[in-house]
Image (spheres, rainbow, N blue to C red):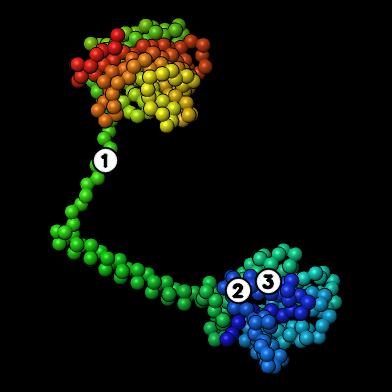
Amino acid sequence: MPHDIFISHASEDKITVARPLAEALKERGLSVWIDETEITVGDSLRQVIDRGLAESRFGVVILSPAFMAKHWPARELDALAARESDGTKVILPVWHGVEQTEIAQFSPMLADRVSVSTNLGVDEVADRLLDAVSRDLISMESTATQHLIGPSRQPAQRFTNSRRLLLTFALVGIAIGLVYLLYLASGLYSPRLTPTPETPQWIPMGGVIILNSDPDDYVGGGNINTLTDKDGKITAQLRDDGVTIEFDGEELWNFEFLAPQGRELTTGVFENAQRSAFRNPLLPGIDASGAGRGCNELIGRFVINRIVGEPSTGLKSIDLDFFQRCEKEPVGLSGSIKLHAKTSPAEPQPK
């Protein structure tokens, strides 16, 4: 059968270069002629080699000191050169242990030709040969003398195969769609509803929020504020990782306290808290803002003295103290929050 590549080499280079290169080219999808796999007992050596030379699209010539010193490899080179008389590229030179001056003395024609050296390694040599072969096969206009390999089919053939494949997929898709519509129309389909996680509830709260702002503190304005459910609406949302509390009165205030990532918000002390929206996930989060003022960056701490509730049913009561300061300023805002759910009058209120 025709081959993509005929490997011409001296016997001394078979084990070190020719055989590994042949295997590497075969792994890349090329059909390779090499004497040890083509010649069997009883064959005419000359006839088999001549047939391999004639039927192979390219000839990889491993130019080495042993190759240039022997008559038989030179004869193979002459046969390959004769096939280039019409301008068709056939010879692909591979240098092995030789320099350009040696090649020039052996064959001036080959010395001027782009080649690849085994100094780059067998895999790199195989990749470059595959690139040269693929480019040449794709650009050829006649299909009569081509030995097509997987990635080197002509564009027209690839286009035809692609259209057939797309048509097949389209027909299969239409068939599946029709079967599905018939299944729905049959009444046998009964969708199974998967419950979605409930959004944590906002719970109306009663109690008091006391804020004590140091002089020159930006957020609190240096004031002491007492906010109760008689002064405005207080609501709270409890999540696994934290709690958000809002006060809507003459001023709007928002408070958020988050546990480090992977932890629940429970009773305890939370140090080195950062602004919740931009915190390191491994640290607690805190953010107290109101009256249109808040910190771009902050650091703080908070203590959860008591917390009762579940995210699914909402916050029942909370008792906490906190302190925060903006932009690494020495002054800050401290506060105490004691709230209970108005919807649970039986729940004891924090004292």
User: Do the CB atoms of the residues marked 2 and 3 lie less than 8 Å apart?
Assistant: no
Q: Secondary structure at mark 1?
A: loop
Q: Which mark is residue 20?
A: 3
Vertical arrangement, residue 306 with respect to residue 215, above or below: below
For the point 37% across and 22% down, the residue is 266
The residue under label 1 is which amino acid type? Thr
**Left or right: residue 43 compared with residue 284:** right
The image quadrant that residue 304 belongs to is: top left
Amino acid type, label 3: Pro
Residue 43 appears anywhere in the view: yes
The amino acid marked with disc number 2 is Lys
- 10 Å crowding of disc 3: few (<14), some (14-19), many (20+): some
Residue, disc 1: 196
Q: Secondary structure at mark 2?
A: helix
Cα–Cα gap, marks 2 and 1: 55 Å
Residue 250, compared with residue 196, is above or below; it is above
Q: Which residue is found at the position 72% from the left and 87% from the top? A: 79
Between disc 2 and disc 1, whose residue precedes? Answer: 2
Disc 2 target residue: 26
